[in-house]
Amino acid sequence: MMLTILLITLLCATVVAISARQPRLGYNLDRDIQGQLPSGPLNVLILTAGVGGGHNAAGRALEDELTQAGHHVTMIDGIRAMSPVLAWLLVQGYVQPLRFAPWLLRPVFGVASHRWGARVIQGLVSATFGGRLQRTIQAHNPDVVFSTFPLITGVLGRLRSRGELTVPTLAAIADYGAHALWVAPGIDLHLVMSEQSADIVRQAGGMAAPMRLPVASSFRISYQRDAMRAALNIPGDAFVVLIIGGALGIGDVEGATVEALAAGAFPLVVTGRNEHLRARLEHRFGQRDEIRILGWRSDVATLMGAADCLLQNAGGMTCLEAIEMELPIVMYQPIPGHGKFNAQVMEQTGAATWPRSSSELRQLFAAAARHERPLRVPAYAVNQPSIHTVLAALPTFVHDAALRAPQPRRSWQQISVVGLLTALGMVRTSGEPLMALAEVDAGVDRVVRKFRDAQLSRRIDDQFKQQWTRWSQSVGVRARDER
């Protein structure tokens, strides 16, 4: 009997000690962010990746805005710095399935978007290539590090958690659907587009703050729509649908074009670097006047200035740019995995409309073209801070994010505290577990409430000792009275 009680006590005490370490947050609240930031212009290092086009675009937008603010900014390909072979594998492993077998992305995303699957991937990449990235960072001697790519963020989070990276580190997430691979508990702050995106990051164990992520300056200009249409030889009274399949021209771009034409809209199609798609569309629609087919363009801002809405299938920077220009967004046939997750979150936040079928898309465009049902115009939340505001008050933003960080798992803590105190009570009260359990009930509730605040969990040991002292004294008095 005594051996059993001892084993229960040791097991419960171990679980209490582990749970008190905030396993869900994984962030050291004692970090001196203020002391790690020098006054005046900062040396900023932006780590991006040449996988698709959006991550580099996010990095360039950050670079431009921070440079204009007077900071010294360097942007490099973080994946290539870790390994050129890894960079090649990621590009091929992402581009080829998107073009020829997009269904393969669904199981990959299923693993990567799960919290523990993401941690395994991040751990493997960090263990294999983390040292190289750390040496690259040390060579640039930055004051602040930004990441715009999930795998880089994961490695930075590990380095930061282990104390091998000693400067504030932030992740800029251009996707509304900030899945678990985007999140690393060691990152000081994940910068996201909406409060819903911040909640997703918190549930994955990270610290997040909604903000107005920067875009290229060309998207902050007010364009004259008639002039932009005249330059493209588009009628001024047409309902123009800008169809973009990203830099790679992926997704059902052709199907979306067919439905836009059937609805009486004017498709303005950008095929990116997908020359095969461009040739196919020109062969099918090239003789029609009510469509324009373009290849790779660097003046997407002017195209948005000529359009009435944007049709997209992935999300990311193109959608952020459309939001900056207050251009309605329609998500159609989103690519499996992160594209569909983006569409779900964007629809929930009111940033986009997501028709589920071709007939629904046609009806949507037809009603909009006839001015019967205007499309929803996306907008940032009121008073959403800019990157300048975040950097200027980074300690405050990190502190506020910590207060809203996910709570430790209280169920295991409650069971552990009850089990521990009950086992000890069985010894003190000569084998009367029911009396011991009743005696500690009030104390357990008070202890569990303390776990609900992530910051107070650091002081749980002191709180537990105080509760135990009061309880043991009470049990001792009762035992003497009964004798």
Image: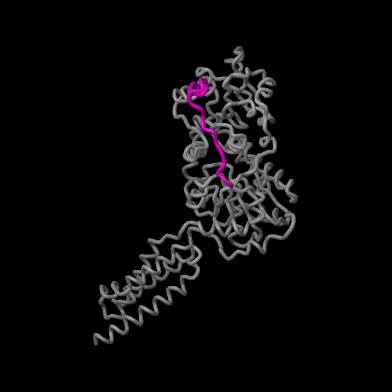
Front position in the image: 107 or 86? 107
Percent across and percent down for residue 135 are 69, 55
Front position in the image: 120 or 233? 233
Q: Quadrant of residue 299?
A: top right
Q: Judge from the rendering whether residue 167 lies leftward or rightward of residue 418; answer left or right.
A: right
Percent across and percent down for residue 196 are 49, 46
Front position in the image: 108 or 141? 141
Residue 403, above or below 267:
below
The quarter of the rendered structure image containing the C terminus is bottom left
Q: Judge from the rendering whether residue 414 lies leftward or rightward of residue 390; answer left or right.
A: left
Our reading of the magenta stretch's main secondary structure is loop
The quarter of the rendered structure image containing the N terminus is bottom left
Q: Can residue 25 be seen from the camera position used here?
A: yes
Q: Judge from the rendering whether residue 462 lies leftward or rightward of residue 241; answer left or right.
A: left
Q: Which residues are magenta?
A: 365-383
How are the residues colored? one colour
Residue 326, above or below 254:
below
Residue 188, above or below 5:
above
Q: Is residue 379 magenta?
A: yes
Which residue does the image show at 56% across and 63% down from the upper left?
28
Percent across and percent down for residue 20 are 46, 66
Q: Is residue 263 magenta?
A: no
Q: Report the label total.
A: 0
Percent across and percent down for residue 386 are 63, 47
Front position in the image: 71 or 153? 71
Q: Can residue 101 be seen from the camera position used here?
A: no
Residue lying at the far left in this picture: please name it.
Answer: 482
Residue 319, above or below 392:
above
